[in-house]
Amino acid sequence: MVESFVVNCYKPPMDNKQAIAASLDWSQAPAQSQDGLAAGLKIDEYERIVTALGRVPNQTELGIFSVMWSEHCSYKSSRKHLSKLPTTGPNVICGPGENAGVIDIGDGDAVVFKIESHNHPSFIEPFQGAATGVGGIMRDVFTMGARPVANLNALRFGDPSHPKTKHLVAGVVAGIGGYGNCMGVPTVGGETEFDPAYNGNILVNAMTVGLARADRIFYSAAGGVGNQVVYVGAKTGRDGIHGATMASAEFSEDSESKRPTVQVGDPFKEKLLLEACLELMATDAIVAIQDMGAAGLTSSSVEMASKGGCGIRLNLDLVPLREDGMTAYEIMLSESQERMLMILKPESEALAAAIFAKWELDFAVIGEITDSGNLELIRHGTRVCALPLSPLVDAAPLYDRPFVIAEPAAEFDDSTIAPTHPDSLLRDLKTLLARPNFASRRWIWQQYDHLVGGQTVIPPGGDAAVIRLTRDHVDMKKGLALSVDCNPHYCFSEPRRGGAYAVLEVWRNITAVGGRLQALTNNLNFGNPEKPEIMGQLVGCLEGMAEACRALSVPIVSGNVSLYNETNGEAILPTPVVGGVGLVDDVSKAVTIGFKSAGDLILLLPATRTDLFLNQKTSSLGTSAYRREVMGLANQGRPPAINYSLELATAAWLGQMMKEQRISACHDVGSGGLLVALAEMAMKGNLGAAVTLPAAIAPLVAGFGEGLWSYLLTASPTDAEAIMAAANTQGITIFTLGKVTAAAELKVENHGTISLSELRAGYDSFLPNLMQN
Amino acid sequence: MKIAIIVFPGTNRENDIRAALVTAGVAASNLQLIWHRETAIPAATDLIVLPGGFSYGDYLRCGAMAAHSPIMREVKSAAARGVAVLGICNGFQILCESGLLPGVLLSNQGLKFVCREVELEVATNQSIYSRKMVKGHRLRAPVAHHDGNYFAAPEVLAELQDRDQIVFKYAADDNPNGSALNIAGIIDSSRRVLGLMPHLENATDPLAGGIAGRAMFDSILNG
């Protein structure tokens, strides 16, 4: 970073190649390779810049290169492998590459959505870091013309007993709530996990889902030589300078000294920006629009101009500034929040200015579109930057980093795990439900306004959230089922299966409420990709994800990569979070997890051919939560295998049964296994259950094994008959597990009884207790 | 019935109240959104609603900025003429800050935003907002606020009680914010201006939030 002005005026030698340089501002020393290092570039990257330009850059230009070529903006380590993901499909309006992905959901409606990380800032300053993460992703969505209708988040914290964890949880949750609540966008879902692997590097991934008209999507490609470049929103300050670069580096103990690189959010300003943008978008004034997120004015102007195949000239003296004396470098690299860049059609200025005046936001014409193919910047009347756009965007290094994917381990032998006690099944269930990773998340989601808008059909605390959609203030029949998921332990044990399983979890969560998964977004959180084993995790997870997406015919339409999640060389668990959007045709038929009536039958669906686990061809306890959380042992063996054809058949059949309204409750069986799912259904419905575990399988495997079962359902005895018959014709096996009972207890044949109040004691109290003490 | 819904910058539950009123039978043509810069309330308005949200960001005391916006002069004079005024959540805060209701809403006792269903009790049905309800009846409706902790001087609280101005209370074991006397909603001495924290407008739809709040809208519209 430029700390002080150099008084001497350098006069670099001139030759033909450097003619352009003659007109540039050289009041500071030309940027050398050590300046590149300071800005986060490698030596060879600096040399690449000099080669591409045919001259040395000045300090402002180097700053621009350093952010554009940061991992965060250029995806230089992941791009090669990201191309393996399926990103197209008949419903895809816009895949990766724009501010967010866009899918068609019929009736002329489109859903715009994306997930994005704000990990590093949230660790340094949890409230503002998380808040601006939420603000940033909402801007990405409304930039494209959509009104945000729901927020979700995926959080990872360190060990609950780590001295920092409590402070981080409190700050992140308050920050997410503080921003989303003020914006009036309900936060309807998410996931939170604790593990020591995140002690020095928490993860805060925020997802926003918006609704637009399919023929009113706004893009970022600039066009029309002479068209005005307009800056709207908040003023530019010195906050967040080099945020994108910070987000692309490892942490060390002094990371808190990077606090000034964290931006400060103003959700009120963003609420005004949202309303003003949507009001302007209802007119015909906008050619292109792009939010100023990571790398601020730099990446927005460069991306808009390069996508449009044109050039752009900005007079930085016209940029609304919050403080005096800001240099071109600072203006271009500021990550001040709540700002947008727009290209307006000719003669639209007055109309647009009036709308922004109504919303009391800054509006400034700061430049114009040119045909030069260059980014030209003027500050104090002097040309401070004249960079050809193509090297900034296209010449960014693309790394094919070496990677090592470990050979899959041998299948774990489930029979080697003995129960902790002969009668321990229900006691272990109680233990598991009180563990940090299973206890109720109510303490978190009660701090999020999950109801604003009045469209929340299934609030947090179930499988997927469901929101109803409206058009012109009229409720539609249809809605969206939304979920985010990832099991980092599976990803660590075997990246390929773990990546696939993250997709499958979302698929099941959405299926379980009566939705049909339409498309995904992903947030790839990994350690330092320069280490082959970390790069191997990334590649393996991506390949697994791609495999599952292809098998289930679901595209990934947007995403974010967050690498270098390491502190003092310790990497996080590989955490490729997947967010999904499902369509619910009729929200009145959406299904929730809670038991509904005593006497309903409880039905269990297998996730694989039962003979495989009967014959111990596949294992279920090696990477299970039971092994980690109850036994306190490390993962061993492989995560569960996936039977895609059975998943597809089960989902199609389940969707039909829900359409016929034959299913009274449904819950996917995920981490923790069958008994956890059963207990959650009972606690939610405040009704008990009397069940018998499938006889042929060891009780521990049946009760806590993972990967054996896909869903638990309830249905009235009459409906259950029809369900069984329909399943039979589809070749789907169903176990009748038992019955919902009025007594508030779980009774497992041969394993005793436990009251729901006993289960709730630890389940409900873990987070409130942690956060109080 | 003609209804004006005031929209401040930062208001975010205007569509929720709109939907609840339409569900209750108000024709959409009789609902008008009024921007805070406007300087007149439409003639023949029967009810003014101040919806929930974060007016002006609520960076100062909640509702303090909105209380000084141009439209509030008109709201006050309309209230003086006997026009009914309903403030929900941020609207309640604005009514207190503008002096239309006594007391103030402090930060929740837990110092956290709280969004959850609470158990409410109808403390009086002697109001145009609760006349179709049964005194003592319990209903469940959501709250969603950071500053709902009603506070007033002891003599003000005594007066509210003596004059039957407490319309809704939280069940004693379900007070989400620590408000005095478990107050969830109060009415002014003219019995036309109601402020309440719970979002009864988010409890009028069987598919999203349930219908426990319908009785309030029924009271307003079908007296």
Image (cartoon, coloured by chain):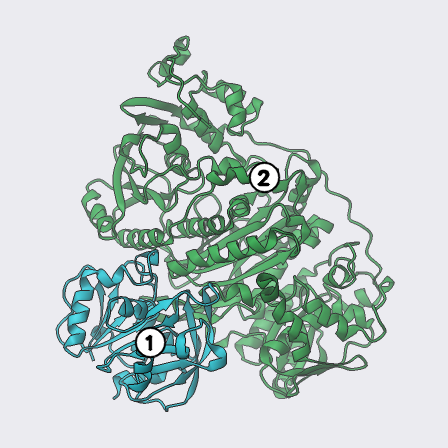
Chain colours: A green, B cyan
2 and 1 marks on the same chain: no
Residue type marked 1: Ala
Q: Check whether the beta carbons of the residues at disc 2 and disc 1 lie within 8 A of each other.
A: no
Which numbered circle lies on residue A78?
2
Quadrant housing residue B142: bottom left
Q: Secondary structure at mark 2?
A: loop
Instruction: List x then y, in percent, for residue A543.
Output: 65, 47
Q: Quadrant of the N terminus of chain B?
A: bottom left
Is residue B69 found left or right of A232 in the rendered image?
left
Along the viewing direction, whichever of A89 and A51 lies nearer the viewer? A51
Quadrant housing residue A469: bottom left
Instruction: List x then y, in percent, for residue B148.
Output: 39, 69
Along the viewing direction, whichever of A280 and A605 lies nearer the viewer? A280
Along the viewing direction, whichever of A563 and A444 lies nearer the viewer? A444
Is residue A17 found left or right of B26 in the rendered image?
right
Is residue B52 found left or right of A443 in the rendered image?
left
Which numbered circle lies on residue A234?
none
Residue type marked 2: Ser
Q: What residue lies at 49% left-to-right and 46% top-to-bottom?
A: A96
Q: Quadrant of the C terminus of chain B?
A: bottom left
Q: Residue furthest front?
A: B155
Q: Residues within 10 Å of mark 2 (few under 14, many from 20)?
A: many
Give me the chain letter of mark 2.
A
Residue A558 in view here: no
Along the viewing direction, whichever of A752 and A458 lies nearer the viewer? A752
Which numbered circle lies on residue B20?
1
- 3D distance between C-alphas at marks 2 and 1: 48 Å
Q: Secondary structure at mark 1?
A: helix
Q: What residue lies at 54% left-to-right and 36% top-to-bottom?
A: A71
Q: Residues within 10 Å of mark 1 (few under 14, many from 20)?
A: many
Q: Compared to A556, does B147 lie above or below?
A: below
